[in-house]
Amino acid sequence: MNLFNLRRSTPAVELRKTVALNEPAMPSLTRKHLMPGVERAPQVFVRGQGSWLWDNEGHAYLDFTQGGAVNSLGHSPGVLAKALATQAQALINPGAGFHSRELLELVDRLCQSTGSDQAYLLNSGAEACEGAIKLARKWGQLHRNGAYHIITASQGCHGRSLGALSASDPLPCNRCEPGLPGFSKVPFNDLEALHAAVDSRTVAIMLEPIQGEAGVIPATREYLKGVERLCRELGILLILDEVQTGIGRCGALLAEQNYGVRADIITLGKGLGGGVPIAALLARGTACCAETGELEGSHHGNALMSAAGLAVLNTVLETGFFEHVQDSGRHLRDGLSRLAGRYGQGEVRGQGLLWAMQLREEQASALVQAALDEGLLLNAPQADVVRFSPALTVSKGNIDEMLSRLARAFTRLHARQNNRRVVSA
Protein backbone atom coordinates (compact mmCIF):
# COMPACT_ATOMS: atom_id res chain seq x y z
CA MET A 1 0.00 0.00 0.00
CA ASN A 2 1.33 3.44 -0.92
CA LEU A 3 0.57 5.57 2.10
CA PHE A 4 1.31 8.80 0.25
CA ASN A 5 -1.81 8.21 -1.86
CA LEU A 6 -3.82 8.48 1.34
CA ARG A 7 -2.93 12.10 2.04
CA ARG A 8 -5.87 14.40 2.11
CA SER A 9 -5.73 18.11 1.49
CA THR A 10 -9.24 18.56 2.89
CA PRO A 11 -9.33 18.98 6.70
CA ALA A 12 -10.34 15.83 8.55
CA VAL A 13 -13.30 17.55 10.23
CA GLU A 14 -14.89 18.08 6.82
CA LEU A 15 -14.70 14.35 6.07
CA ARG A 16 -16.90 13.12 8.91
CA LYS A 17 -19.63 11.94 6.55
CA THR A 18 -17.32 9.72 4.52
CA VAL A 19 -16.42 6.19 5.53
CA ALA A 20 -13.87 4.05 3.73
CA LEU A 21 -15.69 1.35 1.77
CA ASN A 22 -13.22 -1.34 2.73
CA GLU A 23 -13.59 -0.74 6.47
CA PRO A 24 -15.97 -3.11 8.30
CA ALA A 25 -18.89 -1.56 10.15
CA MET A 26 -17.85 -0.67 13.68
CA PRO A 27 -20.12 -1.21 16.68
CA SER A 28 -21.19 1.87 18.61
CA LEU A 29 -18.58 2.73 21.21
CA THR A 30 -19.16 4.38 24.56
CA ARG A 31 -16.74 5.96 27.05
CA LYS A 32 -19.08 5.82 30.05
CA HIS A 33 -17.21 2.94 31.70
CA LEU A 34 -13.72 4.38 31.12
CA MET A 35 -12.15 5.58 34.36
CA PRO A 36 -10.79 9.14 34.03
CA GLY A 37 -7.07 9.23 33.40
CA VAL A 38 -5.18 11.01 30.68
CA GLU A 39 -7.08 13.54 28.58
CA ARG A 40 -7.97 11.98 25.23
CA ALA A 41 -9.09 13.34 21.87
CA PRO A 42 -12.53 12.11 20.76
CA GLN A 43 -11.23 9.99 17.87
CA VAL A 44 -11.28 6.20 18.25
CA PHE A 45 -8.37 4.73 16.31
CA VAL A 46 -8.63 1.26 14.84
CA ARG A 47 -5.64 0.90 12.52
CA GLY A 48 -2.12 2.27 12.10
CA GLN A 49 0.70 1.93 9.61
CA GLY A 50 3.98 3.82 9.73
CA SER A 51 3.25 7.50 10.29
CA TRP A 52 -0.51 7.15 9.75
CA LEU A 53 -3.53 6.33 11.90
CA TRP A 54 -7.14 5.66 10.87
CA ASP A 55 -10.16 6.17 13.09
CA ASN A 56 -13.35 4.14 13.21
CA GLU A 57 -14.93 6.49 10.65
CA GLY A 58 -12.20 5.79 8.11
CA HIS A 59 -10.36 9.12 8.39
CA ALA A 60 -6.57 9.18 8.08
CA TYR A 61 -4.35 11.18 10.45
CA LEU A 62 -0.64 11.92 10.17
CA ASP A 63 0.88 11.09 13.55
CA PHE A 64 3.81 13.19 14.74
CA THR A 65 3.43 12.20 18.38
CA GLN A 66 3.75 8.40 18.08
CA GLY A 67 2.49 7.92 21.61
CA GLY A 68 4.95 10.47 23.00
CA ALA A 69 7.94 8.87 21.23
CA VAL A 70 6.84 5.35 22.21
CA ASN A 71 6.31 3.96 18.70
CA SER A 72 9.93 4.25 17.65
CA LEU A 73 9.45 2.36 14.37
CA GLY A 74 6.00 3.82 13.66
CA HIS A 75 2.63 2.12 13.84
CA SER A 76 2.52 -1.66 13.42
CA PRO A 77 5.97 -2.08 11.84
CA GLY A 78 6.37 -5.41 10.10
CA VAL A 79 9.48 -6.42 12.03
CA LEU A 80 7.72 -5.91 15.36
CA ALA A 81 4.45 -7.53 14.29
CA LYS A 82 6.34 -10.57 13.05
CA ALA A 83 8.40 -10.86 16.23
CA LEU A 84 5.30 -10.66 18.43
CA ALA A 85 3.32 -13.16 16.37
CA THR A 86 6.17 -15.67 16.27
CA GLN A 87 6.93 -15.32 19.96
CA ALA A 88 3.29 -15.50 21.02
CA GLN A 89 3.03 -18.91 19.38
CA ALA A 90 6.12 -20.17 21.19
CA LEU A 91 6.17 -18.66 24.69
CA ILE A 92 4.62 -15.53 26.22
CA ASN A 93 5.55 -15.56 29.90
CA PRO A 94 7.36 -18.37 31.72
CA GLY A 95 7.10 -16.38 34.97
CA ALA A 96 9.35 -13.96 36.81
CA GLY A 97 11.20 -16.80 38.51
CA PHE A 98 12.48 -18.27 35.25
CA HIS A 99 14.75 -17.31 32.37
CA SER A 100 13.70 -17.15 28.76
CA ARG A 101 16.00 -17.14 25.76
CA GLU A 102 14.53 -13.79 24.62
CA LEU A 103 15.22 -12.12 27.98
CA LEU A 104 18.85 -13.21 27.97
CA GLU A 105 19.33 -12.23 24.32
CA LEU A 106 17.91 -8.74 24.87
CA VAL A 107 19.94 -8.15 28.03
CA ASP A 108 23.13 -9.24 26.27
CA ARG A 109 22.39 -7.09 23.22
CA LEU A 110 21.63 -4.04 25.36
CA CYS A 111 24.84 -4.38 27.36
CA GLN A 112 27.01 -5.03 24.31
CA SER A 113 25.60 -2.11 22.33
CA THR A 114 25.67 0.42 25.18
CA GLY A 115 28.88 -0.64 26.91
CA SER A 116 26.99 -1.56 30.08
CA ASP A 117 27.78 -4.36 32.48
CA GLN A 118 24.31 -5.33 33.66
CA ALA A 119 20.71 -4.75 32.59
CA TYR A 120 17.35 -5.39 34.20
CA LEU A 121 14.09 -5.40 32.26
CA LEU A 122 10.93 -3.70 33.52
CA ASN A 123 7.51 -2.66 32.25
CA SER A 124 7.77 1.13 32.08
CA GLY A 125 10.16 4.05 32.17
CA ALA A 126 8.78 5.07 35.56
CA GLU A 127 9.72 1.66 36.95
CA ALA A 128 13.17 1.96 35.42
CA CYS A 129 13.66 5.33 37.13
CA GLU A 130 12.37 3.85 40.38
CA GLY A 131 14.91 1.06 39.98
CA ALA A 132 17.69 3.59 39.32
CA ILE A 133 16.85 5.37 42.57
CA LYS A 134 16.90 2.08 44.52
CA LEU A 135 20.17 1.05 42.90
CA ALA A 136 21.85 4.39 43.64
CA ARG A 137 20.82 4.30 47.28
CA LYS A 138 22.02 0.73 47.62
CA TRP A 139 25.35 1.88 46.16
CA GLY A 140 25.39 4.72 48.70
CA GLN A 141 25.07 2.22 51.52
CA LEU A 142 27.99 0.22 50.18
CA HIS A 143 30.35 2.94 48.97
CA ARG A 144 29.39 6.33 50.45
CA ASN A 145 28.64 5.85 54.13
CA GLY A 146 24.91 5.45 53.63
CA ALA A 147 24.43 8.52 51.44
CA TYR A 148 20.94 8.54 49.92
CA HIS A 149 20.26 12.09 48.69
CA ILE A 150 19.67 12.51 44.94
CA ILE A 151 19.86 15.84 43.12
CA THR A 152 17.60 16.33 40.13
CA ALA A 153 16.79 19.26 37.85
CA SER A 154 13.85 21.62 38.09
CA GLN A 155 11.16 20.85 35.53
CA GLY A 156 12.44 17.31 35.19
CA CYS A 157 9.94 14.48 34.81
CA HIS A 158 11.02 10.92 35.60
CA GLY A 159 7.71 9.06 35.58
CA ARG A 160 4.70 8.43 37.76
CA SER A 161 5.76 5.98 40.44
CA LEU A 162 6.12 7.48 43.92
CA GLY A 163 9.91 7.50 43.88
CA ALA A 164 10.09 8.78 40.31
CA LEU A 165 7.53 11.49 41.12
CA SER A 166 9.65 12.59 44.07
CA ALA A 167 12.57 13.05 41.69
CA SER A 168 10.38 15.10 39.35
CA ASP A 169 9.15 18.68 39.42
CA PRO A 170 5.44 19.59 39.81
CA LEU A 171 4.64 19.38 36.09
CA PRO A 172 1.33 18.19 34.63
CA CYS A 173 2.79 14.67 34.63
CA ASN A 174 2.83 14.51 38.44
CA ARG A 175 0.64 17.23 39.92
CA CYS A 176 -1.12 16.59 43.23
CA GLU A 177 1.21 13.70 44.07
CA PRO A 178 3.06 13.40 47.40
CA GLY A 179 6.82 13.23 47.44
CA LEU A 180 9.36 11.17 49.31
CA PRO A 181 12.26 12.70 51.24
CA GLY A 182 15.82 12.56 49.97
CA PHE A 183 15.52 14.62 46.80
CA SER A 184 16.42 18.19 45.91
CA LYS A 185 15.97 20.11 42.68
CA VAL A 186 18.19 22.75 41.12
CA PRO A 187 17.81 24.75 37.88
CA PHE A 188 18.60 22.82 34.71
CA ASN A 189 21.74 23.83 32.79
CA ASP A 190 23.07 25.63 35.90
CA LEU A 191 26.30 23.94 36.90
CA GLU A 192 27.01 26.41 39.70
CA ALA A 193 23.69 25.62 41.40
CA LEU A 194 24.47 21.93 41.11
CA HIS A 195 27.86 22.38 42.76
CA ALA A 196 26.23 24.27 45.63
CA ALA A 197 23.63 21.54 46.21
CA VAL A 198 26.08 18.64 46.67
CA ASP A 199 26.94 17.63 50.23
CA SER A 200 28.03 14.56 52.18
CA ARG A 201 24.55 13.03 51.89
CA THR A 202 24.56 13.17 48.09
CA VAL A 203 24.74 9.82 46.34
CA ALA A 204 23.81 10.74 42.77
CA ILE A 205 22.79 13.36 40.24
CA MET A 206 19.84 12.30 38.07
CA LEU A 207 19.12 14.17 34.83
CA GLU A 208 17.40 13.93 31.47
CA PRO A 209 19.77 14.82 28.61
CA ILE A 210 16.77 16.59 27.10
CA GLN A 211 13.87 17.61 29.31
CA GLY A 212 10.94 16.38 27.25
CA GLU A 213 7.94 17.34 29.37
CA ALA A 214 9.44 20.73 30.18
CA GLY A 215 9.26 21.56 26.47
CA VAL A 216 12.19 19.70 24.84
CA ILE A 217 15.00 21.62 26.55
CA PRO A 218 18.40 20.08 25.74
CA ALA A 219 21.26 20.12 28.19
CA THR A 220 24.19 22.11 26.88
CA ARG A 221 27.29 20.11 26.13
CA GLU A 222 29.30 22.17 28.62
CA TYR A 223 26.72 21.54 31.34
CA LEU A 224 26.49 17.76 30.93
CA LYS A 225 30.26 17.39 30.62
CA GLY A 226 30.58 19.51 33.76
CA VAL A 227 28.07 17.32 35.60
CA GLU A 228 30.02 14.20 34.66
CA ARG A 229 33.26 15.79 35.81
CA LEU A 230 31.66 16.82 39.13
CA CYS A 231 30.42 13.29 39.75
CA ARG A 232 33.86 11.82 39.07
CA GLU A 233 35.63 14.35 41.30
CA LEU A 234 33.24 13.82 44.23
CA GLY A 235 32.83 10.07 43.79
CA ILE A 236 29.05 10.10 43.27
CA LEU A 237 26.90 8.50 40.58
CA LEU A 238 25.61 10.03 37.38
CA ILE A 239 22.15 8.76 36.41
CA LEU A 240 20.82 9.64 32.96
CA ASP A 241 17.12 9.21 32.34
CA GLU A 242 17.03 8.26 28.65
CA VAL A 243 13.47 6.93 28.68
CA GLN A 244 12.55 9.42 25.96
CA THR A 245 15.93 10.19 24.39
CA GLY A 246 17.32 6.65 24.08
CA ILE A 247 16.97 3.96 21.38
CA GLY A 248 17.88 6.28 18.51
CA ARG A 249 15.51 9.17 19.23
CA CYS A 250 18.37 11.68 19.21
CA GLY A 251 20.26 10.18 16.27
CA ALA A 252 22.44 7.84 18.35
CA LEU A 253 21.58 4.78 20.40
CA LEU A 254 21.92 6.89 23.56
CA ALA A 255 21.85 10.66 23.84
CA GLU A 256 24.90 10.46 26.12
CA GLN A 257 26.90 9.63 22.99
CA ASN A 258 25.99 13.00 21.48
CA TYR A 259 27.40 14.71 24.56
CA GLY A 260 30.51 12.57 24.98
CA VAL A 261 29.64 11.55 28.55
CA ARG A 262 29.24 8.19 30.26
CA ALA A 263 26.66 7.63 32.99
CA ASP A 264 26.87 5.06 35.77
CA ILE A 265 23.17 4.22 35.52
CA ILE A 266 20.85 4.68 32.53
CA THR A 267 17.11 4.22 32.25
CA LEU A 268 15.42 3.25 28.99
CA GLY A 269 11.75 2.86 28.08
CA LYS A 270 9.25 4.23 25.57
CA GLY A 271 10.92 3.46 22.22
CA LEU A 272 12.59 0.24 23.39
CA GLY A 273 9.40 -1.72 22.84
CA GLY A 274 8.19 0.17 19.79
CA GLY A 275 4.73 0.37 21.39
CA VAL A 276 4.97 -2.71 23.60
CA PRO A 277 5.47 -1.92 27.32
CA ILE A 278 9.08 -2.69 28.19
CA ALA A 279 11.87 -0.70 29.81
CA ALA A 280 15.41 -1.32 30.97
CA LEU A 281 17.73 -0.32 33.77
CA LEU A 282 21.40 -0.33 32.77
CA ALA A 283 24.34 -0.22 35.19
CA ARG A 284 28.08 0.11 34.81
CA GLY A 285 31.01 -0.62 37.09
CA THR A 286 30.37 -0.55 40.83
CA ALA A 287 26.78 0.61 40.21
CA CYS A 288 26.09 -3.07 39.49
CA CYS A 289 25.25 -3.72 43.12
CA ALA A 290 21.69 -5.07 43.11
CA GLU A 291 21.06 -8.35 44.88
CA THR A 292 18.39 -10.97 44.26
CA GLY A 293 14.95 -9.75 45.27
CA GLU A 294 15.75 -6.03 45.34
CA LEU A 295 14.31 -5.31 41.89
CA GLU A 296 11.04 -7.19 41.76
CA GLY A 297 8.19 -7.49 39.27
CA SER A 298 5.70 -9.94 37.81
CA HIS A 299 6.09 -9.31 34.08
CA HIS A 300 9.59 -7.85 33.91
CA GLY A 301 11.31 -9.20 30.86
CA ASN A 302 8.71 -11.78 29.91
CA ALA A 303 9.46 -13.55 26.64
CA LEU A 304 6.89 -11.64 24.57
CA MET A 305 8.05 -8.17 25.60
CA SER A 306 11.69 -9.18 25.33
CA ALA A 307 11.16 -10.38 21.77
CA ALA A 308 9.62 -7.01 20.94
CA GLY A 309 12.53 -5.12 22.50
CA LEU A 310 15.03 -7.28 20.66
CA ALA A 311 13.29 -6.66 17.32
CA VAL A 312 13.35 -2.90 17.87
CA LEU A 313 16.95 -2.82 19.12
CA ASN A 314 18.22 -4.92 16.22
CA THR A 315 16.42 -2.62 13.77
CA VAL A 316 17.82 0.64 15.10
CA LEU A 317 21.32 -0.87 15.18
CA GLU A 318 21.20 -1.65 11.47
CA THR A 319 23.75 0.18 9.31
CA GLY A 320 22.54 3.62 8.29
CA PHE A 321 19.59 3.83 10.71
CA PHE A 322 21.00 6.60 12.90
CA GLU A 323 22.18 8.50 9.84
CA HIS A 324 18.58 8.42 8.57
CA VAL A 325 17.34 9.80 11.91
CA GLN A 326 19.91 12.59 11.79
CA ASP A 327 19.12 13.50 8.19
CA SER A 328 15.35 13.43 8.74
CA GLY A 329 15.82 15.43 11.93
CA ARG A 330 17.65 18.20 10.09
CA HIS A 331 14.91 18.27 7.47
CA LEU A 332 12.26 18.56 10.20
CA ARG A 333 14.22 21.23 12.08
CA ASP A 334 14.70 23.36 8.96
CA GLY A 335 11.03 23.10 8.01
CA LEU A 336 9.85 24.00 11.51
CA SER A 337 12.25 26.94 11.61
CA ARG A 338 10.81 28.29 8.37
CA LEU A 339 7.26 28.02 9.73
CA ALA A 340 8.26 29.62 13.03
CA GLY A 341 9.67 32.59 11.12
CA ARG A 342 6.66 32.85 8.82
CA TYR A 343 4.15 32.87 11.67
CA GLY A 344 6.18 34.88 14.16
CA GLN A 345 6.84 32.07 16.65
CA GLY A 346 9.84 31.38 18.87
CA GLU A 347 12.82 29.06 18.72
CA VAL A 348 12.87 25.51 17.43
CA ARG A 349 14.96 23.21 19.62
CA GLY A 350 15.78 19.53 19.98
CA GLN A 351 17.92 16.74 18.57
CA GLY A 352 17.45 13.88 16.12
CA LEU A 353 13.70 13.38 15.79
CA LEU A 354 12.65 15.05 19.03
CA TRP A 355 11.79 18.71 18.45
CA ALA A 356 9.70 21.50 19.89
CA MET A 357 8.50 24.87 18.69
CA GLN A 358 8.31 27.64 21.27
CA LEU A 359 5.19 29.74 20.73
CA ARG A 360 5.00 33.48 21.41
CA GLU A 361 1.77 33.03 23.36
CA GLU A 362 0.18 30.25 25.40
CA GLN A 363 -1.68 28.83 22.41
CA ALA A 364 -0.23 25.33 22.24
CA SER A 365 -3.50 23.53 23.09
CA ALA A 366 -5.40 25.60 20.54
CA LEU A 367 -2.76 24.87 17.89
CA VAL A 368 -2.89 21.14 18.67
CA GLN A 369 -6.66 21.24 18.19
CA ALA A 370 -6.32 23.17 14.93
CA ALA A 371 -3.79 20.57 13.75
CA LEU A 372 -6.20 17.78 14.70
CA ASP A 373 -8.82 19.47 12.51
CA GLU A 374 -6.27 19.24 9.70
CA GLY A 375 -5.70 15.53 10.28
CA LEU A 376 -2.39 16.03 12.11
CA LEU A 377 -1.58 14.66 15.56
CA LEU A 378 0.70 16.77 17.79
CA ASN A 379 0.96 17.35 21.51
CA ALA A 380 1.66 20.25 23.84
CA PRO A 381 3.88 19.45 26.85
CA GLN A 382 3.67 23.10 27.94
CA ALA A 383 1.12 25.85 27.38
CA ASP A 384 3.45 27.60 24.94
CA VAL A 385 5.28 24.61 23.41
CA VAL A 386 4.28 22.15 20.68
CA ARG A 387 6.30 18.93 20.47
CA PHE A 388 7.16 16.73 17.48
CA SER A 389 8.25 13.10 17.98
CA PRO A 390 7.56 11.24 14.73
CA ALA A 391 8.51 7.67 13.95
CA LEU A 392 12.25 7.22 13.59
CA THR A 393 11.47 5.75 10.17
CA VAL A 394 9.59 8.87 9.03
CA SER A 395 10.18 9.91 5.42
CA LYS A 396 10.92 13.40 4.18
CA GLY A 397 7.64 13.18 2.28
CA ASN A 398 5.80 12.64 5.57
CA ILE A 399 7.68 15.56 7.09
CA ASP A 400 6.73 17.84 4.20
CA GLU A 401 3.10 16.76 4.49
CA MET A 402 3.19 17.51 8.22
CA LEU A 403 4.61 20.98 7.56
CA SER A 404 1.83 21.70 5.08
CA ARG A 405 -0.84 20.64 7.57
CA LEU A 406 0.84 22.58 10.37
CA ALA A 407 0.86 25.71 8.19
CA ARG A 408 -2.88 25.27 7.61
CA ALA A 409 -3.35 24.78 11.36
CA PHE A 410 -1.61 28.12 12.03
CA THR A 411 -3.85 29.76 9.43
CA ARG A 412 -6.93 28.16 11.00
CA LEU A 413 -5.85 29.29 14.47
CA HIS A 414 -5.24 32.88 13.35
CA ALA A 415 -8.61 32.96 11.59
CA ARG A 416 -10.35 31.88 14.80
CA GLN A 417 -8.53 34.55 16.79
CA ASN A 418 -9.49 37.24 14.25
CA ASN A 419 -13.12 36.12 14.36
CA ARG A 420 -13.15 36.39 18.15
CA ARG A 421 -11.68 39.89 17.96
CA VAL A 422 -14.36 40.96 15.48
CA VAL A 423 -17.13 39.54 17.65
CA SER A 424 -15.77 41.13 20.83
CA ALA A 425 -15.44 44.48 19.07
Image (cartoon, rainbow, N blue to C red):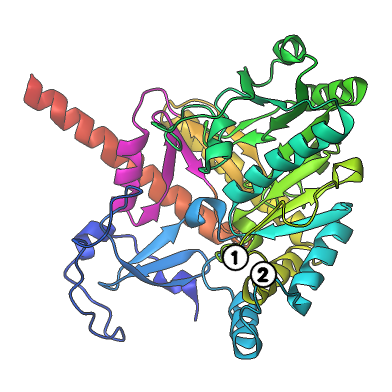
Magenta range: 359-388
Q: Confirm whether the magenta stretch covers residue 379.
A: yes
Residue 418 falls left or right of residue 217: left
- In the rendered image, residue 198, in percent from the top left (x then y), is placed at 76, 15
Residue type at the position of mark 2: Ala
Upstream in sequence: badge 2 or badge 1 = 2
Work out whether residue 320 or residue 125 is closer to the camera in this orientation and state it.
125
Residue type at the position of mark 1: Ser
Can you see residue 245?
no
Task: Check the image and report above or below for 238 versus 131.
Answer: above
Q: Confirm whether the magenta stretch covers residue 156.
A: no
- In the rendered image, residue 256, in percent from the top left (x then y), is placed at 79, 40
At 80% from the left edge and 60% from the top edge, which residue is drawn? 110
Spatial CA distance of label 2 from label 1 is: 6 Å
Residue that badge 2 annotates: 96
Work out whether residue 179 or residue 207 is closer to the camera in this orientation and state it.
179
Residue 103 falls left or right of residue 407: right
When asked about the image quadrant of residue 278, the answer is: bottom right
The answer to the question of whether label 2 and label 1 lie on touching residues, with beta carbons closer than 8 A, is: yes
At 62% from the left edge and 64% from the top edge, which residue is drawn? 273
- Kindly identify which numbered label has been placed on residue 298: 1
At 19% from the left edge and 29% from the top edge, which residue is drawn? 418
Query: Dot 2: what SS?
Result: loop
Q: Residues within 10 Å of mark 1 (few under 14, many from 20)?
A: few
Task: Check the image and report above or below for 246 versus 318.
Answer: above
